[in-house]
Image (tube, rainbow, N blue to C red):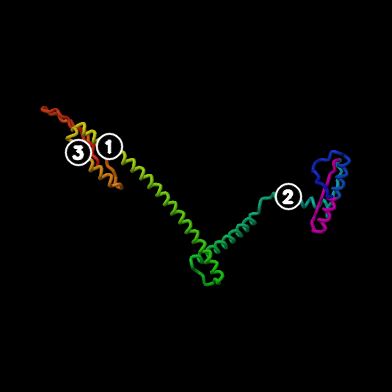
Amino acid sequence: MGRGKIVIRRIDNTTSRQVTFSKRRNGLLKKAKELGILCDAEVGVMIFSSTGKLYEFASNSMISVIDRYNKAKEEENQVPNPNCEIKFWQKEVTMLKQQLQILQESHRQIMGEELSGLTIKDLQNLENQLEMSLRGVRNKKDQLLISDIQELNHKRELIHQENLELYKKANLIRQENIELHKRVYGNGDTSAANGAMLIEGEEMEDDSNGPIHLQLSLPQQQNHASSGAVKLGRLQLY
């Protein structure tokens, strides 16, 4: 059976804790020695026990390891050298120029220029790339056209509904105009007016695509001494 997983926490039992410390300390120092010999690394390990006793290992000298460590930390905290920064940015500029040159060359080849130095395989790859790009552009164009057509159809439906509402309102106004003439002139005298209004209404219905213009003339009152008749204004449809 394999070993069970050990929970990493403080060992409460003093004897067990001391035994574990001794085993793991020896194992850590052994691994540090092997690392220094096998990898030619400079290794330094310091261990203090719970009682304050020191255990250490250094591949060369503990003092040299500590001095090297302090020197490395000081270099990390120092301000970067301006000359190093200039060299770094010069390298970046050179790399960006090379990338720009490659992109410009690729763009010219896509436009059909400077193809003399390309092989058959390069030309085939370029052709496949252009076909894929063209297919993507066409798909995007079709999507935009379909979206525009759907939007126009929706607007057409809205306009059609508005026209129907206007026709209904026009019919109501025509009926009110007929009733108004009946009240003013009586049933016998309004035949001509009714005929004219019906003709106007038929023209309005036939012209389903034309605009509807409504105009209401103000009623005019004329006083006659003999009859005292009052003529009301007429609502006309155009």
Q: Is residue 184 left or right of residue 33?
A: left
The residue positioned 54% from the left and 68% from the top of the image is: 124
The residue positioned 84% from the left and 51% from the top of the image is: 29
What is the spatial separation of the Cα atoms under label 2 and label 3, in whole angstroms?
108 Å
Q: Which residues are magenta?
A: 27-50
Locate the C terminus and report the quarter of the image it occupies.
Answer: top left
Q: Is residue 47 magenta?
A: yes
Mark 1 or 2: in front is 1
User: Which residue in the structure is indicated by mark 2?
Assistant: 73
Closer-to-camera residue (67/103)? 103
User: Which residue in the structure is indicated by mark 3?
Assistant: 193
**Secondary element at image label 2:** helix
Whether pointer 1 and pointer 2 mark residues with C-beta atoms closer than 8 Å, the reply is: no
Closer-to-camera residue (203/237)? 203
**Labels 2 and 3: the sequence-earlier one:** 2
Q: Is residue 180 left or right of residue 33?
A: left
* Residue density around tag 2, few if under 14, some if 14–19, many if 20 or more, within 10 Å: few
**Secondary element at image label 1:** helix
Q: Considering only vertical position in the picture, is 199 above or below 176?
A: below
The residue positioned 76% from the left and 50% from the top of the image is: 70
Q: Is residue 212 left or right of residue 117?
A: left
Mark 2 or 3: in front is 3
- Residue 2 in the image: x percent, y percent? 83, 50
Q: Considering only vertical position in the picture, is 95 above or below 9?
A: below
Q: Is residue 152 left or right of residue 63?
A: left
Closer-to-camera residue (98/15)? 15
Mark 3 or 1: in front is 3
Q: Is residue 17 magenta?
A: no
**Labels 1 and 2: the sequence-earlier one:** 2
- Residue 104 in the image: x percent, y percent? 52, 63
Q: Which amino acid is tagged 1?
A: Ile
Mark linked to residue 173: 1
